[in-house]
Image: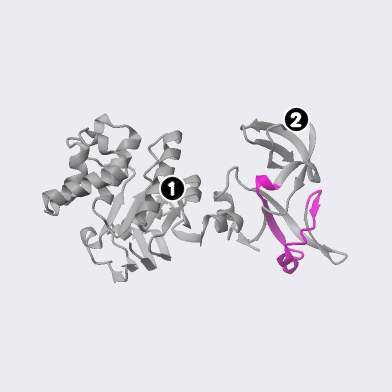
């Protein structure tokens, strides 16, 4: 297991900055997710750690050793790519054994490691098959196995499940979580899929435009987003945003937007923003049909089985609420939404208040 530390990392391609002075730390045995939209720089960070790219500035430490000038081979890391990158002319056994043979390890030792890894990943019955004879999930297990068999100090995963269908992705998420529990390995995992991030990660590092927007546990990032980007990127359906103003009336603080006026007494920090324009974010699960301060026109109902999404037009803003499977309504009718304290956030100039 390795401890990873990155200090003031910068990387540009030509005149285009890709990584902007980032620093982060991953503890031994931690499952760390680098999450963000396509093009935000998360894969570049992974490639810099692996030594496949060279940073312009900054330091990378693996288990206390500065590795910036070392080759990928010398860094003792293993990387699993989005494409399976299996040798098509080799069977599963040969694919697993290839890196060990290149290191000229003893034949018996190679066989023991391959058999052990195959059993761990439940692919021991596939060792004689070629990659073309495997399903997508089986190929991904083999690709992961090629990394495990080397027993590296650090595992790097670059969107390994993106080529799988939804059902198989769900199954592989469970397998990856179980694998981490067994190996106790340090894993850096890149994805743009928030479901993968929330279910697999012990730590989430949220990226946008080459900078780290927030770092924390999945619960921390979801329940206390540091800025509007974090609030809107994480959460399905996306958080509702309402622009309004903080006003004071008879000693009480209110958030006011059009006909909507609420007094979030639990949100003490609003007092410092009296008279200013701010943004209120409300998670859909914090809104339910019923008597409440938000009123509008019912636009659409989506029955999703265990829950129902309710779309309401309030002035020029569309609000999404969650309800029970039994909810019924008629598009075009007036509807009120009750607000629950948990799931409400306030932002000023894009940052959490």
| Marks 2 and 1, how far apart at CA | 38 Å
Which residue lies under the disc numbered 2? 329
Residue 333, percent across and down? 79, 31
Q: Residues within 10 Å of mark 1 (few under 14, many from 20)?
A: few
Point out the tag, 2 or 1, that comes first from the N-terminus: 1
In the image, residue 303 sits, relative to residue 99, either above or below, namely above
Residue in the foreground of this view, choosing between 330 and 218: 218
Q: Is residue 230 left or right of residue 94?
A: right
Dividing the picture into quarters, in which one does residue 184 lie? bottom left
Between 106 and 147, the one lying in front of the other is 106
The residue carrying mark 1 is: 38
Segment colored magenta: 257-286
- Is 51 in the magenta? no
Res 138 quadrant in image: top left
- Above or below for 127 versus 220: above
Mark 2 surroundings within 10 Å by alpha-carbon count, few (fewer than 14), some (14 through 19), many (20 or more): few
- Taking the spot 85% from the left edge, 67% from the top edge, the residue there is 251
Q: Tell me the quarter of the image containing the N terminus.
A: bottom left
């Amino acid at each position: 297991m390795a401890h990873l530390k990155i200090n003031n990392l910068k990387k540009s391609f030509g005149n285009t900055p890709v990584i902007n002075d980032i620093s982060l730390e991953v503890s031994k045995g931690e499952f760390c997710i680098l999450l963000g939209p396509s093009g935000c720089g998360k894969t570049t960070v992974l490639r810099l750690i692996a030594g496949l790219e060279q940073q312009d500035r900054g330091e990378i430490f693996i288990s206390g050793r500065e590795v910036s000038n070392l080759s990928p081979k010398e860094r003792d890391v293993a990387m699993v790519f989005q494409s399976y990158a299996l040798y098509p002319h080799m069977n599963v056994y040969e694919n697993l054994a290839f890196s060990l043979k290149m290191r000229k390890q003893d034949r018996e030792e190679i066989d023991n490691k391959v058999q052990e890894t195959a059993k761990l990943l439940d692919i021991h019955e596939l060792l004689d098959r070629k990659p073309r004879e495997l399903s997508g999930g089986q190929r991904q297990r083999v690709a992961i196995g090629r990394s495990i068999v080397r027993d590296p100090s650090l595992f790097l995963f670059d969107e390994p499940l993106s080529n799988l269908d939804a059902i198989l992705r769900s199954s592989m998420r469970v397998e990856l979580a179980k694998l981490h529990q067994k190996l106790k390995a340090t894993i850096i995992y890149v994805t743009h899929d928030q479901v993968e991030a929330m279910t697999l990660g012990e730590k989430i590092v949220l990226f946008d435009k080459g900078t780290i927007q927030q770092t924390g546990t999945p619960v921390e990032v979801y329940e206390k987003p540091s800025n509007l980007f974090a609030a809107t990127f994480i959460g399905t359906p996306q958080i509702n945003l309402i622009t309004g103003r903080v006003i004071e009336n008879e000693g009480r603080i209110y958030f006011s937007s059009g006909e909507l006026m609420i007094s979030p007494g639990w949100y003490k920090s609003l007092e410092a923003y009296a008279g200013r324009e701010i943004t209120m974010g409300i998670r859909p699960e914090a809104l339910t049909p019923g008597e409440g301060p938000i009123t509008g026109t019912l636009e659409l109902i989506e029955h999703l089985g265990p829950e129902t999404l309710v779309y309401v037009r309030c002035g020029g803003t569309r609000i999404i609420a969650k309800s029970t499977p039994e909810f019924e309504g008629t598009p075009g009718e007036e509807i009120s939404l009750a607000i629950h304290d948990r799931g409400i956030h306030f932002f000023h100039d894009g940052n959490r208040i």
